[in-house]
Amino acid sequence: MSVTRKEVEHIAELARLKFSEEELDNFTEQLNQILAYVQKLNELDTENVEPLSHPVEGVNAFREDKVEGSVPRKEALKNAPAKDDQFFKVPKVIGGET
């Protein structure tokens, strides 16, 4: 199977792309190289090869959940530019004028 220059021109037209003569020749050659490689891959015997969902087998590296204490509220709020006794104060970002 190979691609002709006329087919490359047609594909470019469908995609609304404009190429120079040199680019059309280059794309024709490259597409033919790709198709030749795919044809070569089709020659491989994959009869006893199971399909993969992903080419690399990965193992989840989850860690065990541990309940730990958090930063005390005073410590968390100590460098806040705006705060009240318990919360960070932030500018209103939803709704109308403040």
Image (spheres, rainbow, N blue to C red):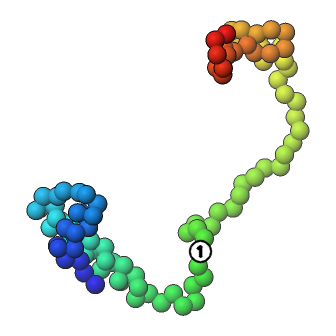
Residue annotated with mark 1: 52
Image height of 11 relative to 68, above or below: below
Q: Quadrant of the N terminus?
A: bottom left
Q: Amino acid at mark 1?
A: Leu
Indicate the position of residue 42 as horizontal and vertical percent values.
Answer: 41, 85
Indicate the position of residue 11 as horizontal and vertical percent values.
Answer: 26, 67
How packed mark 1 is, by other alpha carbons closer than 10 Å (few <14, some 14-19, many 20 or more), is: few
Instruction: Please tell me which residue is depicted at 84% across the width and 46% down the height of the picture.
Output: 65
* Quarter residue 8 falls in: bottom left
Instruction: Please tell me which residue is depicted at 58% across the width and 79% down the height of the picture.
Output: 51
Image height of 7 relative to 14, above or below: below
- Secondary structure found at label 1: loop
Q: Quadrant of the C terminus?
A: top right
Q: Is residue 34 left or right of residue 98?
A: left
* Quarter residue 33 falls in: bottom left
Instruction: Please tell me which residue is depicted at 23% across the width and 57% down the height of the picture.
Output: 17
Q: Of 34 and 65, which appears nearest the observer? A: 34
Q: Of 20 and 94, which appears nearest the observer? A: 94
